[in-house]
Image: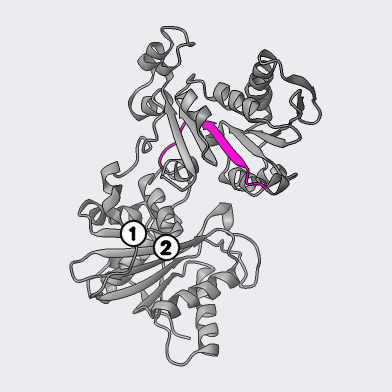
């Protein structure tokens, strides 16, 4: 598999494998062999410790073995010159913004699954040295189906190729290494750490078969009954209507756009953004409502969000004629309790998700629930479902949506 990775001409390549599968070795060897005279390359490692303990020593040893090591300046990070005339810059990905710099011919991200997705995206934008399209390779142990490395390398994107190896595939490990680890690891963790497989997280609420290809759709269905738009603002109680700050803790402001068809199926799209200020939330929410004229638009009104609902009404009345069917929900039950009510729709295949960036984010958060770092998209979907049940006259307990009046 290392040979296949080395021969690949895909612009974006990943070598994913279990512990000790030779990931860093092939990443370093591949870069040494690809490095061209007069060109600049970047090697990214998650932390300074990994850079100095693994990534840099591996690269140096291979370059020396191949007779192309030309020396290095080591402060603040190693800058290597090969005898072939190529320059290799080593950097950490602890702050992805610091990966910005010169135009590059190629990038190798070692242990990429321990980095933020921002590091990968910033590197992509630098692959333009001498007016040519550059390449990027990534080596890593997988971190689950919801992780950005799976979304970028494991879903069949154009110009992208994935290569897979297990711990046992590496003949240079001790003969008993893989078997010894297998006696200590178990379940999905063993599949990930030894098999190098992308797996659903251990302890996730719903089984992987809930999230098969049957889930996806491209175009809204005909014969709709009701359309609902729901917003989880994910803004703190001290936020101001005009503040430019991002949502707290990287949370998304998430709009769930849901259509109900007569067979009881929910057709869902999501617009999620963690850099949207309050003004942007109101602007985008009203634009989404105008695009489909939903039967109801529901907003969480806990704490600050009540003021946000008033701002929706104010801006709507200033620009439009006719009422805005805006409802408020005060959430009192814990979020995990509310999101679990989506389970029957998944189990009965009555939930369909539009194949968009927001839709994919919803599915990754559902797939890893309740272990996912964020759950704003499922939270918005749950509010939309409650709104639909209210419109259908089916009681939803003490948290019934209430029409917001200006």
Q: Position of residue 390 (x, y in %)?
A: 28, 73
Report how far apart the C-alphas of labels 1 and 2 lie in the structure: 9 Å
Q: Position of residue 392 (x, y in %)?
A: 23, 75
Instruction: Identify which residue is drawn at 64% across, 17% down.
Output: 62
Residue 50 colored in magenta in the image: no
Neighbourhood count class around disc 2 (C-alpha, 10 Å): few under 14, some 14–19, many 20 upward = many
For the residue labelled by badge 2, is the local secondary structure a helix, a strand or a loop? strand
Depth check, front residue: 261 or 140: 140
Answer above or below: position of 150 versus 366.
above
Instruction: Identify which residue is drawn at 55% across, 62% down.
Output: 235
Q: Seen in the image, is 28 located left or right of residue 350?
A: right
Q: Which region is colored magenta?
A: 132-145
Q: Which residue is mark 1?
A: 353
Answer above or below: position of 269 versus 132.
below
- What sort of colour scheme is used for the picture? one colour
Neighbourhood count class around disc 1 (C-alpha, 10 Å): few under 14, some 14–19, many 20 upward = many
Q: Is residue 398 visible?
A: no
Q: Are marks 1 and 2 in contact (CB under 8 Å)?
A: yes
Q: Seen in the image, is 119 located left or right of residue 20?
A: right
Q: Position of residue 59 (x, y in %)?
A: 65, 22
């Amino acid at each position: 598999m290392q040979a296949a990775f080395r021969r690949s001409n895909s612009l974006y390549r990943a070598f994913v494998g279990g512990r000790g599968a030779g990931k860093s070795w092939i990443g370093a060897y591949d870069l040494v062999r690809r490095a061209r005279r007069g060109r600049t390359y970047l090697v990214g490692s998650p932390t300074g410790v990994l850079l100095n303990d693994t990534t840099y020593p591996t690269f140096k040893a291979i370059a020396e073995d191949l007779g192309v090591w030309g020396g290095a300046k080591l402060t603040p990070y190693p800058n290597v010159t090969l005898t072939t005339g190529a320059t290799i810059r080593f950097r950490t990905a602890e702050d992805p913004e610091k990966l910005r710099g010169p135009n590059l011919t190629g990038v190798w991200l070692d242990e990429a699954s321990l980095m933020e997705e921002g590091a990968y995206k910033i590197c992509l934008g630098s692959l333009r040295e001498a007016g040519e399209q550059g390449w990027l390779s990534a080596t890593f142990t997988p971190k689950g189906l919801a992780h950005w490395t799976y979304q970028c390398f494991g879903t069949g994107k154009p110009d992208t190729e994935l290569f897979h190896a297990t711990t046992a595939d590496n003949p240079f490990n001790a003969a008993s290494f893989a078997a010894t680890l297998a006696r200590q690891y178990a379940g999905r963790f063993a599949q990930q750490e030894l098999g190098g497989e992308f797996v659903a997280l251990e302890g996730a609420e719903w089984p992987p078969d809930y999230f098969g290809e049957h889930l996806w759709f491209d175009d809204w269905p005909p014969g709709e009954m009701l359309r609902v738009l729901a917003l989880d603002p994910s803004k703190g109680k001290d936020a101001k209507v005009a503040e430019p700050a991002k949502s707290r803790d990287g949370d998304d402001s998430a709009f769930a756009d849901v259509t109900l068809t007569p067979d009881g199926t929910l057709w869902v799209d999501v617009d999620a953004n963690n850099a949207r200020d309050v003004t942007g939330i109101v602007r985008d929410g009203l634009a989404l409502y105008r695009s489909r004229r939903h039967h109801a638009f529901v907003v969480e009104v806990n704490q600050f969000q009540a003021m946000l609902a008033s701002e929706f009404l104010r801006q709507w009345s200033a620009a439009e004629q006719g009422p805005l069917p805006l409802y408020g929900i005060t959430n009192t039950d814990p979020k995990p309790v509310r999101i679990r009510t989506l389970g029957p729709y998944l189990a009965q295949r009555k939930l369909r998700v539009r194949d968009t960036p927001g839709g994919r984010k919803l599915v990754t958060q559902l797939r890893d629930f309740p272990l996912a770092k964020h759950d704003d998209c499922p939270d918005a979907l749950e509010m939309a479902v409650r709104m639909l049940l209210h419109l259908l006259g089916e009681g939803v307990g003490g948290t019934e949506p209430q029409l917001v009046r200006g």
